[in-house]
Each structure stands twice: as structure tokens, then as C-alpha cells.
Image (tube, coloured by chain):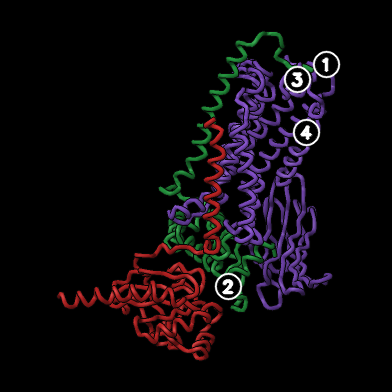
Amino acid sequence: MSSRIVPLLGFLLLVVLLMFGLNIADQKTNLPSPLINKPAPAFDLQVLAKPGERMSKESLLGKPYLVNFWGSWCVTCRAEHPVVTQLAKLDAVYIVGLNFRDETEDAVAWLQKWGDPYDVSLSDFDGRVSIDFGVYAAPETFLVDPAGTIVFKHLGQLTWEIVENEILPRVAKMDANSSNKGTGS
Amino acid sequence: MSLLGTFLVRSGVLTSVHAFASDPTRGIFILIYLAVVVGTSLTLYAIRAPKMIQGGGFAGTSRESFLLLNNLVFVVMTAMVLTGTLYPLLIDALGAGKISVGPPYFGLLFSWLLVPIVLAIPFGIYSRWQQDSGSRLAGLLRLPFLLALAVGAGAWVMQPEIGLIAVAGVAGGAWVILGSIFYVVHLMKKRNSPTIPASVLAMTLAHVGLGVFLVGVSLTSTLSSEKHLRMEAGDKYEAAGYTFEFLGTSKVQGPNYTADEGEFIVTRNGQEVTRLYPQKRQYSQPGNSMTEAAIDPGFTRDLYVSLGEPLDQDGRAWAVRVYHKPFIRWIWLGSIFMLAGGMLAAGNKRYRRKMTAKEPALGATEEVTA
Amino acid sequence: MKPANFIVLVLTMTLSIAALAQRAPVQEPMIFENPQQEERFKQLTSELRCTVCQNQNLADSDAQLAHDLRAQVHEMLLAGKSDDEIKQFMVDRYGDFVLYRPPVQENTLLLWLAPIVLLLIGVIILRVNIKKRAALLASAPNDESGDGTS
């Protein structure tokens, strides 16, 4: 009798697995980043529309910052723009706009039309830096700590919920840590 | 399996070339249906299945044993495909990461699992029902075995670049084919007749089909060549003794598309083999472009050419792909043989006869054994 | 375009990676130093998965990222990197997901061992069953010939 139950039990386990699969079906194309808690890739990029100026990862060490990958060709970036703008108004964290695979004129026009929420905009024309960050869709947003380690990544449209629940608390913790260090030394 | 397959491709649970119209809502209904149908049948099985062994006894070396071995390996193959397909989902469910399982896994394991089957087939063909002896079978199979090794060695000598695995594949295919043919000859001698029963023909067709398939896969996967190159009118490219000369493109109008049609002359040893006319089509509704490859099929090889993109403004230089695929039709041919053999076997009258109390288990065949 | 490709293209448009309005990538054939390198390129790109069009490998995918990553693989091959180094480059950025051949590691042990284990279990069950049948044969009265002629 026991051996004949086995197929049924096995099948029930399969159904449980498939039910799980259905639950996460709409998110299954989202890949977790292997870069979480690893150093952010080094980069050295020209500032958007300013041929002489450049910015590298080194210059951003010492304070937490957000890197928001976007392109003027990206519809979802337009959709998340109000959230990014609102976050910029809070002045809670330094926001780097990383424009990738985009013509400079298109990017500048996009920012002029919809508003520029970024503290600085960098241009990654050939997309090399985006590959180093493991970006495969747009928009993607990374939170980097003062030591240059990626602590959080969000794939897709940024919502205020994500900002409130994931980004701001982490930034607050990092600010608290650095001010503690300040008083301790 | 069928219901599970329907669920997998429709529900959005898997990302796959085979998934279409993925819709988790629809998936729920299919899953419920699957659970009810399979769940109740398995429950019935658990409750009602009789406990006695069906059928009679048979020895360790017997036709029955070989059939059981065959079934075992096929079941493991099927289970392997199922686990490979669902494994990424399982790992995701357990929060252990996101991995992919693709052709490298399935191809590798399928090939390894095929080895015991291929080795056993000629033994199975010759084996008697209920009781047989390993040494008797070995004696009968010595010659086909040596010939198969010779075929493998021949392949190795003629085309060493295919590598040992492909050589093994060719030898294995030859082993199955030769084992089947030798048995037919053996049977004809025993029955003193130039004919064989339909069931034996069916079995032979199916096994020969497998052998042909194996040879085709081994040779085509290792000897095929694909070249992506830039060509202008007058350029030539040589592959496997064939010379492909690009003559240029011309505009062609189709019912719902316009196309750039390229012309290629294929020659071998100076003789023209064929002319190929691949097209790069622009469809009007919607404005997609498609490439239509031009194929020259053949028993021992397929040649094909496809146009990629024009590489300059006036479209004189093109990115072209040229393929030479030896023995690729053997894959289809082998499959057709297997299908024919299977259908012939299924049509056997004994499955449509009423069983009487005296008859042995339904697997018995009519052949006379030595 | 195959239906599956079309649907994936629509899906990826919502993440806006392969906007057709972008500069169209020209498929200039790649130059390799030797046939082995070209073979390695084909092998590598067929074993890497496209993260955008996830039901295609890197060799077949038409996504912008796939073009860029193929160029990346090409560049690394010309620079003398090994196959493992190239695969590691991809895994470092995109995770194990991009490998169609699952690496043999902790979370894939079950996957790689399952067929062997199943086969062994099957062989054991087979042996037990055959022994039972052989015993049955030995104890059965010998009134039937073993040939099953009909």
C-alpha cells in the first residue's frame, strides 16, 4: 500500500511547486543582482553635455549615492521620473543620473523637457558601464554606500513605496553611521 | 505529462521558446484541472491497484529483461527532462538563487543515457522470451560488433576532426543497424523464407531508424560549418569542397513584401551544383523584415545561404551566412523510420484480437528462435 | 518573426531596452584570428543566455544588449581571455542565470546527480523484480516452451 501512495505524494509536491511558480510568474524575468554587497564597478565617465568634465567612482567615495540608469528611449524612465524628482527635492541622497546608450542631444532634450532631478548626469554612450553594473533593462537604480559598496538595487520603475521602504531607511542608517564615526574620532 | 506540458507553456511559469500566450490567470485554471485529473487517478491507483504480479516468470537474461531495461532508461530520460525543466523553479522557490538549465545539460545527459540503450539493442533483438543465455547472444553478435567497430574506425580515419565522442556515436549507430540487419538475415535463414513477419519488420525499421539518427547527429554536430562573412558581387567562399560565389542582389516583388534577392552559384570541382536565391524581405504590414534562407537539400548534406544586412548604402556588400551541414537529413530520415516502425508495430493484429485464457503475456512474438 | 519572439519583444518593450528607434546595430561579420577562436565564440555565445530575450541564447538574440555582449565576448577572445574567464565576466555581472550549462556547485548538485541516482535506484528495483520473476520461472511447471510461438 505504501509504495502506491508515492506517486500521489510526489504529484502533490509537484503541484505545490507549480503553485509557487504561478505566484512569482510575473517577476520571474527579474534577476537578482550578483553585485549586492560587492564593490560598485569602477567607472570614469564624461559629464553629460560637458566634454571637458569627467567624474569617477573615486570622487564619489565618502558619501552614499544613488545611481539611476536611464535613457531618453526608455518609456518606463519617463514613468518613474516624478518619483525621482520628488526624491531629489528631499535632498536626502546624492543622485547620479547615468544616461546610457543614448545620444547626448536626445538626453539633454529629455531632461530639459521633463526636468533634471539629478545632482550630476553622466554619459555612458557605449553602455560599457551599464554592462559592468549588470544592467539589462531600464530603468535600474543602485544605492551605493560611502565605501563604494552596492547595498541595494531596484529593477524597473521606481515607486515611492520602494523609496520609503528600501532607499530612505538605508540612507538614514548610512548617515547615522558616518556621523557616529565623526563623533567617535 | 500532456496536461503538465499545457500548464508549463501557458501559465508563464517558465521562460522558454515553447512558452506562448503566458497568462498566470489561465495558468491557475490549467493547474486546477491538472491537479484534479491526475490527482484522482493517482488516488484511485493507490487505493485499488491489485497487489499480485502480472504475467509469468522470466530469467535474468531474457527478452523481458531487456525490455524492462529499455523502459527503465527511457523513464530516467523523461525524469531527467522533467527535473531539468523544473529545477530552476525549485531553486527559486527555495530562495537558493536563479539558475538556468539549457541544452548543454539536456544534451549531455541524454547522450549518456542513450549509451546503455544503444549497447543493449542488438542483444534485445536476438534474445528469446523467458530464458536465454548471454554467451549464445554474444556468439551471434560477435560479427556485427566487430563490423561496427570497423565503421567507427573508418570514420575516425577519414574525418579525425569529429572527435572520439562522434566516432562512438557513429559506431553505436552502426552497431544498432548491423545488429538489426543481421537478425533479419538470421531469421530468414531459420524460417527458410525471404519474408519476415510484420512485427519483425516494424522492430527492424524502428531500430535502424535510431541508428541512422545517431549517425546523423554525430556527424552533423561535428562536421557542420557556418560562416558569417561580408560578401560583394564577385566574392567567393569555400567550404568543404563547395565554392559559393555571390553574384549580387536584385529587387523582387512578392504578394505582401518587397525583397532583395541574392544569387549564389555553388560549384564543386568546377561543376555547378546549384544556384541559391536567399531573400531579405520587407513586409508591408507590419513593417518587419525577415530573411528567407535558400536551401539545397541532399542525402549526404544540406547547403544553405542567408542574407543578413546590407553593409553599405547601395547594398552591394552584404553580411552573408553560409552553411554546410553534412548528414542532417539523416536525423529526419531516422525519425521517419522510427515513426514508421512504431506505427507498423502498433497496427499488429494481435492487439485487436480477443485474448483467450491459454495465451501467454501479450508481448510474445511469432519468430522462431534458434 | 516567430510568435514567441514577438511576444518577448512586446514584453521587453515595457522595460524599454530594445527601442527600435535607436541607432540600428549593423551586423558587421566579426573577424577572428583563427577558426578555433571562431568556434569558441559560437560555443560561448550558444551557452550564454540573453537576459533580455530570456528564451534565447546570446548567439540568436537580437536585443541591443545581446549585440553589445557578443561584441564583449569577441573583444575578450581577441584579448586572449579563456572561456572560463569570459563566462566568469558574465556571471559576475548577471549571475548564474546567464549560464545555460548549470555550474556544478552547491545548489546544483541535486540537478547533476539526480539522473545517476534515479538510474541506480531503477537498476536496483529492476534487479529485485527480475529476481522475483526468475524465481517464479524456476518454480513454474514446464508445460510451455520458452519461445511463445503462436
- The disc labelled 4 sits on which kind of residue? Ala
Mark 1 vs mark 4: tell me if same chain. yes
Of the numbered discs in the image, which one, if any, rests on residue B346?
Answer: 4
Q: Specify few, some or many for label 1: CA neighbours under 10 Å numbering under 14, 14-19, or 20 or more.
A: few
Residue, far top = C142
- Judged from the image, the secondary structure of the residue bearing numbered disc 3 is helix
The residue positioned 46% from the left and 76% from the top of the image is: A159
- The disc labelled 1 sits on which kind of residue? Asn
Depth check, mark 3 against mark 4: the one in front is 4
Q: Where's residue A84, x and y in %? A: 44, 82
Q: Which chain is drawn using purple?
A: B
- The disc labelled 2 sits on which kind of residue? Thr
- Judged from the image, the secondary structure of the residue bearing numbered disc 2 is helix
Residue named by callout 3: B186
Residue named by callout 1: B192
Residue named by callout 2: C14
Q: Which chain is drawn using green?
A: C
Image height of C124 relative to B272, above or below: above
Apparent colour of chain A? red
